[in-house]
Amino acid sequence: MATRITRRSLAQLALVPAAAASMQPPPQPENAEQELAAAGQNVQRNFEAMSKVTLPIETEPAFQFKA
């Protein structure tokens, strides 16, 4: 008898490796200079990724600053 697999259960199975990989702690830098360099690279990668996305002004929420 064949086991029936639903799309939902297949999606859950596909997420297991990604969840397991994200649970591993990031490697610790050996000194402060390496930590600073890694943080700078992370900021640069995030900036480049955000620069590629165009966001229409209509999507911005309306807000007011009140002091």
Image (tube, rainbow, N blue to C red):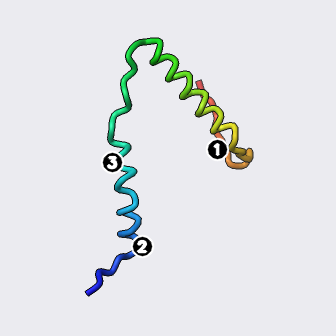
Q: Are marks 3 and 1 in contact (CB under 8 Å)?
A: no
Q: Residues within 10 Å of mark 1 (few under 14, many from 20)?
A: few
At x 50% / y 23%, what residue is drawn?
38
Q: Is residue 49 above or below residue 10?
A: above
Q: Residues within 10 Å of mark 3 (few under 14, many from 20)?
A: few
Which of discs 3 and 1 lies nearer the camera? The answer is 3
What quarter of the picture does the C terminus occupy? Answer: top right
Question: Disc 1 designates what residue?
Answer: 61
Q: Secondary structure at mark 2?
A: helix
Question: Disc 2 designates what residue?
Answer: 7
Q: Are marks 2 and 3 in contact (CB under 8 Å)?
A: no
At x 56% / y 25%, what residue is drawn?
41
At x 36% / y 53%, what residue is drawn?
17
Count of marks, rendered view: 3
Q: Marks 3/1: CA distance?
A: 35 Å
Q: Quadrant of residue 43?
A: top right
Q: Position of residue 28 (x, y in %)?
A: 36, 24
What number is the disc on residue 23?
A: none
At x 35% / y 76%, what residue is drawn?
5
Q: Is residue 59 above or below residue 66?
A: below
**Residue type of the residue flagged with mark 1:** Pro
Mark earlier in primary sequence (3, 1): 3
Comparing 29 with 58, the one in front is: 29
Q: Residue furthest bottom?
A: 1
Q: Secondary structure at mark 1?
A: loop
Mark earlier in primary sequence (2, 3): 2
Q: Is residue 51 above or below residue 31?
A: below
What number is the disc on residue 20?
A: 3
Q: Residues within 10 Å of mark 2 (few under 14, many from 20)?
A: few
